[in-house]
Image: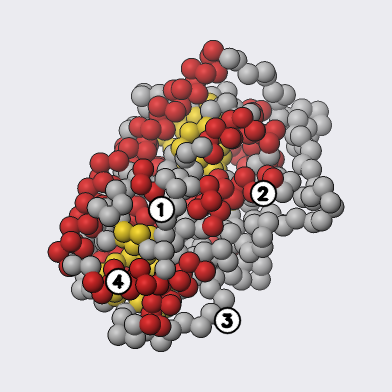
Amino acid sequence: MNQPSDIVILGLSITSSWGNGHATTYRSLVRGLAGRGHRILFLERDAPWYAGNRDTPHPEGARTELYHSVEELIDRFEGEISTAELVILGSFVPDGVQVGEWITSVARGTTAFYDIDTPVTMGRLAAGCYDYISPDLIARFHLYLSFTGGPLLRQIESRYRASLARALYCSVDPEQYQPSPHRECWDLGYLGTYSDDRQPALEALMLEPARQWPQGRFTVVGPMYPERIQWPYNVNREIHLSPREHPGFYGAQRFTLNVTREAMKRAGYSPSVRLFEAGACGVPIISDWWEGLDSLFEVGHEVLISTCADDTLRLLREFPDAQRLALGDRARRRILAEHTPRHRAIQLESYWREAHDNVATHPARRHRRWRSAGGLDAGVAPQPARQAASGEARGEPGQSPGGGHLHQPAGANH
């Protein structure tokens, strides 16, 4: 695995960061792998809501190809899937179970599932929603890569018979994300797509402080926020910034806010890419608390914690400026030491080697070839209906069980 290899990644998106955090994660990982000499083919389903918002149509380090259907994917890329040394399928890929069944049937190299939404995935599996991954399919992959670390990895191995479950967090390119000379325009900023379960924390940790401190300057950037939200007059709103604009955005803040989705907080050990981006830019971070945060950053020394509006206001108005700048600098040093694309590429290579050795020791049963007399669907396990035991219908693909599309921006159905 230390030798240059052919790697195929099938992910939600690498060309568009609109309404999703997958693109920046894949771009960073691809750069790290390419820097190690690997040859990367990235395959992305051509979705209309990303087609109109492709901020990086040709990402560095990968040959990127778009496809329109599973049939086209198979016709064009079965040869490269079958011969690649490593094939990675990401979470929330459309028709993911069908694609995964095909990959694990034809790939002769190591196969991996990269779950960028692990706590959400676990909730969907518990609800019987098997749109992009299924319990049977988890057991067929040689490696389960997870955005969530900690105890949940052992549960994935024991409950879903994953051969190896390992944490592969996001990373950030320190050459792209670095301290910016921009003038500080905001006391506190936040960058993130709207989600129902994250909004209460945003209300408590930013919007309420903005109401209580009229002299303060605040900004929120992200799509899909409902019109019903009443923004305080001192909160600036922007719909979207391309990743190339992120460093300037972070650099214009005295502090930046990190807010975690409720499912990620319950699971713990689930850092967001924004946490690493802000750290790489040397911007002091105020974050909500979740189990495992102190395994990534030293609390009080590299990141600050807020649990309520009073905490946020105290930090914004009373934290000494020299200590604030020193804290941001220490956070950047942490990123440079542990969370760059090169670190993630080396980490992935070690997991890949471990999975390869595990397969050699415990060879898996052979799967039926995809292309059999039965045609496209031959060799594919049937997908169970998306219903609970009670018969209550569950969410549609791309939608969380609690409602609200996770990776489909507003207006995508029109």
Compared with residue 350, is residue 276 higher up or lower down, i.e. above or below? below
Q: Amino acid at mark 2?
A: Arg
Q: Locate the C terminus by quadrant.
A: bottom right
Q: Which residue is mark 1?
A: 273
Specify the label residue 124 is tagged with: 2
Whether residue 193 is visible = yes
> How crowded is the residue under tag 1: few (<14 C-alpha within 10 Å), some, or many (20+)?
some
- Place residue 410 in its image quadrant: bottom right
| Marks 2/3: CA–CA distance | 28 Å
**Few, some or many residues within 10 Å of mark 3 (<14, 14–19, 20+):** few
Q: Which residue is identified by label 3? A: 228
Q: Which mark is residue 220?
A: none
Tell whether label 2 touches label 4 (CB within 8 Å): no
> Disc 2 or 1, which lies upstream in sequence?
2
Crowding at dot 2, Cα within 10 Å, few <14 / some 14-19 / many 20+, comes out as many
**How far across and down, in percent of the image, does residue 119 sit?**
57, 48
Q: Are marks 2 and 3 in contact (CB under 8 Å)?
A: no
The single residue placed furthest to the top in the displayed view is 361
The alpha-carbon separation of the residues under discs 2 and 1 comes to: 22 Å
Which numbered disc, 4 or 2, marks the residue that appears first in the sequence?
A: 2
Give the label on residue 314, or none.
4
Picture quadrant where residue 99 is located: top right
Residue 30 percent coordinates (x, y): 40, 42
Distance from disc 3 to disc 1, alpha carbons, whole Å, reads: 27 Å
Q: CA distance from mark 4 to mark 1?
A: 26 Å
Secondary structure of the residue carrying tag 1 is helix
Q: CA distance from mark 4 to mark 2?
A: 39 Å
Percent across and percent down for residue 127 are 72, 49
Quick one: label 3 or label 4, which is nearer the N terminus? 3
The residue carrying pointer 4 sits among few (fewer than 14), some (14 to 19) or many (20 or more) residues within 10 Å by Cα, namely few
Q: Residue at x 31, y 79 (%)?
A: 217
